[in-house]
Image (cartoon, rainbow, N blue to C red):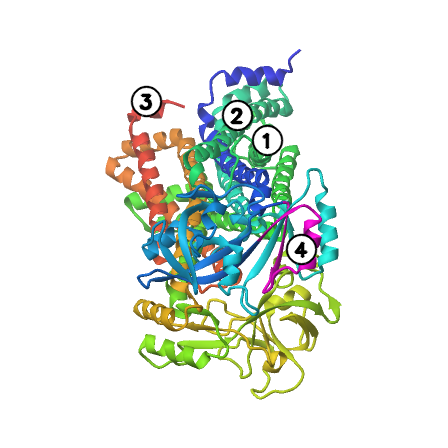
Amino acid sequence: MIPLSLRFAGRELRGGVRGFRIFLACLALGVAAIAAAGSTAEAFRRGLASQASEILGGDLALSVRQRVFTPAERADLEKEGRVSYSVASMAMAEAPSGERRLIELRGVNDAYPLAGSVTLQGASSLQAAIAPRGGVAGAVVEQPLLDRLHLKVGDQFLAGNLPLVVRGVLMQEPDRLSRGFALGPRVIANIGAVERGGFLAPGLPFGETARVALPPGAPLEAAKVRLRRELGGIVRIRDRDDAAPGIHRLIDQLEYFLGFIGLASLVAGGLGVFGAVSAYLEVRKPVIATLKALGAEGQLVRDIYLVQIGLLAALGVAIGLAVGAAAPLVMGALVRDSLPIPALFAVYPGPLLKAAGFGLLSAAAFSLAPLGRARSTPPASLFRSDLSGSLKIGPEIVGALLAAAGLAAMAVITAPTKLAAVIMIAGVAVSFGLLWALGAGAAWAAGKARGGSRGPLRIGLANLAGPHSAARTASPAIGLGVALLGAVVLIQSALLNQVAEIAPRTAPALVFTDIPGDRTAAFDAAVTRAFGRPLTPTTYLREPFVTGRIIKVRGEPVVADRIPRQDRWAYDSDISMSAIGPKPNDSGITEGRWWPANYAGPPLIAMDVDVAKGKDVKIGDAVTLSVLGRDIDARVAVLRKIDFGGFGASFPLVVTPQAVAGANLRQVAIAKATKAQEAAVIRQLGRDFPTVNVISVREQLEAATSLFDRLALAVRGAAAVAALAGLLVLAGAIAARARARTREAATLKVLGASRAQILLAYVFEYGAVGLIAGAAGVALGYAAAWPVVVKVFHAKWSMDWEGVAALLGAAAVVAGVGGLLAAFQALSKRPAPALRAE
């Protein structure tokens, strides 16, 4: 009762899968890449979800800026459950030796932490370590601060003017991820000590966060609604389901990008699938011809090989899923203790099902067309060894097109950003088409050029122009792999150049914060003494600084939830502002005109275009700001594009000075300095202005470079998978033509060609394919990398010529080595047996 097609397919599969090794490798490679990316991302998501309360520090976290919670607000909070309070500020830590370093100072109360635990070395508990002894408060600090200031447990140091004793080494805090990036080592002390140190004075850039642990079973959303109603809109509220939103977005984007590279590998390997199926059917020509001559219909012939290909596709997908599921488990076992975020490594069905779907659709899209050709070719053509007829519209072609459409639709549906997915898929499709056209054009040009050539060059050109030219079969896949790898290399090199070379030249080396507004002249004099040279506008800038929140636009209250997530940063919390009269240098004005230096009219605002985009703010619109506890109604006079990495007044909002008249605003300053000047000014300010914070931009850039290097390694490794897919296609093309190459080499030897000439011909043929595909791939990689660097990251473009040369050379050399191996294989048999064999 078994259908005839299944019986025939089973008999043929008894001979093994020798002709389908490339087929299996191409499918398994792409599926493994997609499965590994999805499984790793899911492990991180599950890890974050499993520790959501610990990461947030409770069930709810409520924050205010430049003030602490009022007694009434604390009473409202404590109605909901247990509450812990913490304050955060920056300070300069100073050792007895005089060495100084910026720190993130945090004060906590006795209830901290509500969830999770603080890991310490040298202390039994956090509360015991930070309790005052002998009139001096204790603190726990991170090891980098001890190393920088040459301190040890038991030593005393200053945080600003606050004496602290190191009572333990801070290894881990449960809520570190929810608080984001720190500009310096973390120090935890008692909240009362931080207040006594003067860090919570009005106008200083500090904030307080209350974390709430709800009673068991209490509804989370209802508590959020009540607190939002009671506390008003100026309090930022997060819950345990949104404990680390930035990390979640990063995981989503990284998963899709790495998975997309795996999908591109499937597309690049699709030519290998197509070639493997075509080569297998060519070997089976006598069988197909015999079946058709005995009366078998084309549908039966197609079904016989469709069953075989379907089973082998399932095998290839299964291999890829096994590798993709195992890779994160192996990674977890090796690096679990050094991961910056929690992860639960396990086998997750969701990512594997998605990877399997991609693999099966890819197999269908690239293997159905050769089956259609075998079904529609008449027996006489098969007996004449003609299986290269034109493709005709039929169920196989329709199925291949539907599978390709399903592949694209699935990629878009599973993407975190649909528009970006459409652009990337369209880019791959256009690149694939251009590479195919380039391969066909190279074959045509080789045919035209061979007439004027001689010897091995003529043989190589003739092979390039032939119907089975590697320029047609392998160059699209090689080019696509090089394009993906080239795009990653060029983006990485440009961004690293921006961070390591361009930014240090254009950005300030030092940022000074918390400069007393009534001592600016003395501060400028101290910096001048430390630098040993006069201050100029090109090397030193100082402006007032305050934070505020946009609460109304065009008279309507701002509701952050109605603003696109990517633009919400400027409306759901306080942002930095300044009050400037004269138009600053490099103002970046895109619309409007800056007010006169002596302007004394109603308040005006200069707004960054990225801030304006969130609420579609135009010139002349009314905007209400909440600044220093009062509302300021102003009109937008200027829209400007800010270069946050440049040397200028990089404030998202600037108001006219009269808008904040009477307020003794603290100031910030930026300066360009050498390492020696940096060390000198830190020592000088330690004597004259110990409460002024000094941020070393140079150190932050070095840390960013290190982080980017680690992240880029994973992305570059994924892109190398696509390049490997191209090599598999090249190997498949060589294997498919092995028998024909043997006969060709035997014929050339009989006609008097030497082994060296045949070897040179093959090396030239495949080396030319690699060089052409590599050059096209680098050009496409450039076209993809430039807009990402310039438009997405707003960085300056720089070309990595060494990387480009390495990619071109590698593509040509690898392809040439492939040709050399093909030649050795063809020359390994004696001419007589090769010419007698069919």
Mark 1 nearby-residue class (10 Å; few <14, some 14–19, many ≥20): few
**Residue at mark 2:** 315
Give the amino acid at mark 2. Leu
How much space separates mark 4 and mark 2, taking CA atoms? 62 Å
Highlighted magenta segment, given as a residue range: 59-85
The answer to whether marks 3 and 1 mark residues whose Cβ atoms lie closer than 8 Å is no
Q: Position of residue 625 (x, y in %)?
A: 66, 71
Q: Quadrant of the N terminus?
A: top right
Give the amino acid at mark 1. Pro
Give the amino acid at mark 3. Pro
Q: Nearer the viewer, mark 1 or mark 4?
A: 4
Does the magenta-highlighted stretch encompass residue 69?
A: yes
How much space separates mark 3 and mark 2, taking CA atoms? 36 Å
| First in residue order: circle 1 vs circle 2 | 2
**Residue at mark 3:** 833
Quick one: 452 or 25, which is closer to the camera?
25
Residue furthest to the front in view is: 134
Q: Quadrant of the C terminus?
A: top left
Quick one: 184 or 353, which is closer to the camera?
184
**Residue at mark 4:** 74
| First in residue order: circle 1 vs circle 4 | 4
Q: Nearer the viewer, mark 3 or mark 1?
A: 1
